[in-house]
Amino acid sequence: MTFAHLPALEVVVPLIAAPLTVLIRRSAPAWAIAAAACSFSFVAALLLAAEVAAHGPISYHLGSWAPPWGIEYRVDALSAFVLVLVSGMATVTVPYAWRSIAAELPRDQVYLFYTMFCLCLAGLLGMTITGDAFNLFVFMEIGSLSSYVLIALGRDRRAQYASYQYLVLGTIGATFYVIGIGILYLATGTLNIADLAQRLQHVENLRPVLAGLAFITVGVSLKLALYPLHLWLPNAYTYAPSAVTAFLAATATKVSVYVLLRFYFSVFGLHLVSVTLPMPEILLVLSIVAIVSASLVALYQTDLKRLFAYSSVAQIGYITLGMSLTSRAGLTASVVHLFNHGITKGALFLLLGGVALRAGRTGLDRVHGLGRAMPLTSLGIVIAGLSLIGVPGTAGFVSKWYLVLAAIEAGRWWLAAFVVATSLIAVAYVWRFVEAAYLSEPDERTPEPGEAPLAMLLPAWLLVAACVYFGFDTSYTVEAARRAALLLLGAAQ
Amino acid sequence: MRGFLVLRVVAKLLMPFMLLFALYVQFHGDFSPGGGFQAGVIFAATVIFYALIFGLPAARQLVPEALVETMVALGVLVYAGVGVAGLLLGGNYLDYFVLAHSPVHGQERGIFWVEVGVAITVSGVMLKIFYMFAGRQRSAEDE
């Protein structure tokens, strides 16, 4: 009986955990509640993914109102995959937060951190699982509002400015999204995503639909930090508490990518997006600019967190690049990279949190000789950095490989060459860390020899290990991505 | 405001009616405009009114911060609890049909408790915001 209700419980358990942590008002029990809720969501996501793989999509009717009237939760190959990523990252981050947040936040605010974390998780999971376009907006707001608070909790006072910047842009994004939904509702009279897709095919006057598509594209692109709408991201990632940066970098933008995929392929359909409008071409150009410019900007950063934040903008470019090919191979690459980049960036930011704890900051001038002072942390950053570059034997290689294959399949050799060439810029910015950590002598700003606490090192290394593991065993990730791509293209035709 | 006897007396006279009106808006929300959000705001407005006349410390004594924070969380829990109750009674999440012997009564009971949850959280959040803004002014004056 419980199993049938897993789609609802997936979101409801973290949602209920959030007010519970407020009621308890103490940090240790709040942490335990958050950890339990995140682990539950993760297990539930894994079970749902297994169920979807075996028996096809699951539809759950909230309040027993049948769709399209009621709100439907829908788990299919794509959303199950994203659910696993999001809840898995949360489950890794919460044990890490125990020490990391205690060091970065005043004691009386720690339990509120877990409240916001649970709410953010519930919002992101809800965005992924819901089959209702307006419900998606509600969860988007839950996830966004809590992430503004999470970012503002950073020790640096600039965190509040960063959070405010994200609040303004994120709110514009959400508003644009809801305007788009409003227009689609006027054109079709439904909010259910599957029903929207069906009814849109019979809409005669396409102009409002195209306006809706434009609004949704801009709104969601703001949330996913597509170039040139990425301006909120570097500050937010740099000044947020380490655990928050790691969690948001690995999940928040990825869920927005999921929303864009869902709307382009499941709702509007390939014909509308690529024939009526030149969306793939626009995405292609923006992705290329994102990859080149953000990678180049990353090269000149003096702070490691900011460096990898810009690298995130570039990596999102690879994800949208795969999307813009609109082929099976392209979408597979896109979805695989969504997952692989999530764990890679998660690992990097978790490790950087350890550096921040020991060195006070994550500036490149603080990590001279870090290879000797914190050997495990440095090694982890290098391995995750290799995955970011796409070196064979790491998760990053798998996604770049499929991206190159997709480009060749589309007959765009220059694009394949471009993907390989831009990886070299990633080599350059990862090298800057290697140079500082391994080839420079320690100076007075280097932290004393000694690793980050085990509670922080273990979760981080778990993700580093995942980066390597998914570089060799691609059966889970690529298989799931392939099914997701098939689903998206199946719905699009 | 210590000197303004008329204000203090009138305020004390008005407040029970304001609270009663909040309850009316809450429970008559099924049949007329109103509901949990509006009732919660009116309830919070009563306390804010009290704070304006008798001062913030008095209001903090009447409705302590800890209670306000509890209310914020409790309302959400009541709302979510209705959903869980639906689950436990064999329906889907937020299923009101199973909450009573007949579906119509079930719907009524479900929405009743949901609105109670909304009222509690809304009034809690309103008061929290008021306390935070009012308290900020105060600490600036102290410096």
Image (cartoon, coloured by chain):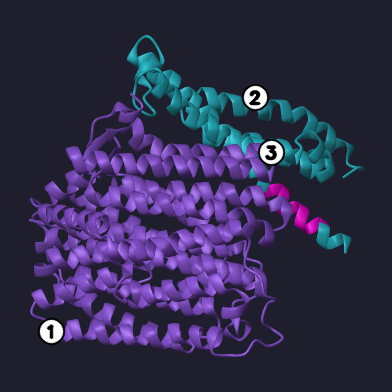
Marks 1 and 2, how far apart in space? 74 Å
Observer-nearest residue: A265 or B45? A265
Residue depicted at x 65% and y 68%: A357
Q: Is residue B132 magenta?
A: yes
Q: Is residue B35 magenta?
A: no
Marks 3 and 2, how far apart in space? 20 Å
In the picture, which quadrant includes the C terminus of chain A?
Answer: bottom left
Q: Would residue B28 be visible to someone looking at this image?
A: yes
Residue depicted at x 82% and y 56%: B138
* Residue A430 image point, x, y percent: 44, 82
- Report the amino acid beneath label 2: Leu
Tell me if B39 is positioned left or right of A193 in this view. right
Reply above or below: A201 against A402. above
Q: Secondary structure at mark 3?
A: helix
Instruction: Write down the residue under mark 1.
Output: A413
Residues behind callouts 3 and 2 on a single chain = yes
Marks 3 and 1, how far apart in space? 63 Å
Q: Range of the magenta residues?
A: B129-138
Instruction: Write down the residue under mark 2.
Output: B20
Instruction: Write down the residue under mark 3.
Output: B68
